[in-house]
Amino acid sequence: MNILTIAILTTAFLLIITGLYLLARTHNMIRIIIAVEIVMKAITLLLIFAGYLNGNFALAQTFVVTMIVIEVIVAVVAAGIAINIFRINGDMNVGKLNKLNG
Amino acid sequence: MSASFAVLMYAFMGLPLLAIVVFNLIGKKRVERCCIPIGYIVSLVQVAVAIISMMLLVQYNKEAINFSQFWDMTVSVDAAYLSVDMFSLVALFSVGMVAFVSFLTGRTMVRGKVFAFSNVMLILMMGMNGIALVTDLFSLYVFLEVTGVASFVLIALYRDGFGLEGSFKYLVMSAIASAFILSGLAFTFMNFGSLQYAAISSAMADGLHLAPGNAIVQNAAFVLLIAGFSIKAGIVPFHGWLPDAYQSAPAPVSVVLGGIVTKMAGVYAIIRLLGDLFARESVVGTAFMLLGLVSIVIGAVAAIGQKDFKRILAYSSISQIGYIVLGVSTGSAIGLLGAVLHFFNHATFKTTLFVNSAAVEKQTGTTDITKLGGLQRQMPVTGVSSVIAFLSTAGIPPLAGFWSKLLIVIAAWQAGGALVAGVALIASLLTAAYFLRLQRNVFFGPAEEHLSEVTEASGAFKLASIILTVVTVGFGVLFPVLLNFMQAQGWL
Amino acid sequence: MQQSIIIIICLVAMVLLGLAAAMFRSMVKAAISLAGISAVLAVALFLMGAPWAALFELSVCAGLVTAIFISAISLTSPDRKQPEKVSEHKSRFASLPFILIFAGVSLIAVFILGGFVIDPVAGQVTAGAAVTFREAFWNMRQADILGQVIIILAGAFAVVILFKEGGKA
């Protein structure tokens, strides 16, 4: 395994770990969205790496382009919902979202 | 012949798109009144086209119809085309049926946001149709996301604290699931060079022979795909988001969420993966068998103690989805048939129950079952359809649920032995238990005083319940005929 | 060889910026770190041979998404006069660097010592069809394009529904 492969795989895993850890530990809603974005970056890296191995860059790039478009729309919707929650609750604390218990 | 087929297939994707365009072009004054009727038309046309296509498939004795939306298929063989086969048609039929019922429910319950509701419902339908139509794993992901975004928006439609909170939690879980699925797809792409169904199944046709390094990657891909789709389908232990999302959604949205969205987004993909693509990978099958069993039991047990109508239905959904996954994980034709049938049956009876809960909520203002009682006299249609729906869920003959559960239990016996089948059967008793409790608390028993003025729900609700009940009963009674027909055709 | 070195530098920068995005207390700085990750990722993608992906990553993620985040943050910043009700100390995430270092070292050790090779050729289905990006995108993936159009439509409706003030939405 050459050093580039090792570096890419390690980076992707570390970014995923960062993203998941942040998702679990944070209290701020917007930071949750940032965590999801970080995981998506890692996946972009993995997809292009797969294309690099296959030699099939064209197909890999189409995947990445579509994925980026989808990720942006999801981020917009998430931010919209977060802003609305802020208007109702007054702060961005995820711990306060406890109306649904039972 | 293929040209006329292609024209029919446009209905699935083109018609909702056309309807959205029409909505946005009509002037403001008239649009409010004709939003929902156009929704009716679109969903009914979808149901009709699905039935016609099923008959065409049988008549011409074809496996599947391939068609392309915009371009000539001879351009490139590797292109991502669209295709229907029997299972997709069953799914498309269910989508149309549940969407029609949801529009019926929405007519009276969606206050002031009819335009937004109809538009996003049509997008949701297009997303689910897309999931059923594609032949490529990555396109599957794309339409999964479309369905997801439409659901987030629908749950948050009223912008109240409840709905927004449920929507946000669902969004986060869905994003994590999509991340897992995409990682699995990236690893699969590394190994196979293409993500098309045809390419992958032909490569797996004689078993998977991979170099050791690639095999590790492929196993990682399997784990990630299983985890991701299990989150989407609401299988234990990834089911945490499901009760909250179902409970916090507005009533017509709960109908479509519980009736079809969770199943299309999660279970349809699992059936495709297990039934077509990775059918020979025993590791994947065993994992799903285990997950299915656990979901059946835990879903049923958790439903017994709940106080809210919709949460009981949510946990019941988790349990029934466990049955479907159990059926398909056995790998036999009987299991697959049972799973597909249970998919369809669940769409009918669970939707009936959600419609009834919407009717109860509209008439009494609450979904807390400790506060309800004795509604049988005041809401007879709702009560009776509820009874039939829950009998079908518990698997009582001659209703439709009995047949699909029987097939799944038989397949489980053949594949996993008596223990697996026994657990599935015992869970049926638990199902009957929690539904009996629900029925007793809400409909039977003495009438509560503060509910004395409650009347039967309006015509739209009655129509929805009656249609779905007729389908449940009719399908159950006619099933032996269907079975004979299928054996004559040589499918079993 | 020189290219590989630059790519590796970019990858290391990505991990460090990721750490920064997690640990900054100020949300604006976290959003800007995210933009930094996108920019560095775009450079790495370009050097690996994927120019179109790099283009989209740079323009959309480093540009558009950052703008969305910053507007969301400014719309939801708590009132300056009141003290913040919940402040996230850096110490909440203090264990993250150590986790990352530990995971990184063990992963590298596993990869080097495990000695397994990902062989791209064995197990290939279609020998990498050497089509251009243009052909692949517009001819072969039209189902995806349809999906993108629909999801953009959904996003437009979402913005209208979620942001419209009063009146009928």
Image (spheres, helix red, strand yellow):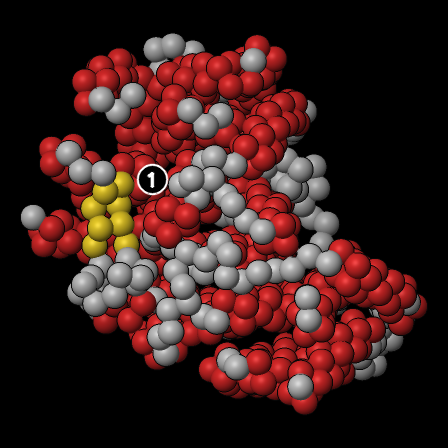
The answer for which chain carries disc 1 is B
Q: Is residue B356 above or below residue B251?
A: above
Sort mark 1 into few (<14), some (14-19) or many (20+) by Cα contacts within 10 Å.
Answer: many
**Front residue of A6 and B45:** A6
Image quadrant where one finds the C terminus of chain C: bottom left
Q: Is residue B314 above or below residue C66?
A: above
Q: Is residue A77 above or below residue C133?
A: above
Q: Secondary structure at mark 1?
A: helix
Lateral position of residue B98 relative to residue B75, left or right: right
- Residue type, label 1: Ala
Image quadrant where one finds the N terminus of chain C: bottom right
Identify the residue at image location x=15%, y=34%: B61
Lateral position of residue B49 relative to residue C107, left or right: left
Identify the residue at image location x=62%, y=23%: B297
**Front residue of C30 and B308:** C30
Could you tell me residue C37's position as x and y percent? 68, 80
Could you tell me residue B386's position as x and y percent? 43, 22
Q: Is residue B153 visible?
A: no
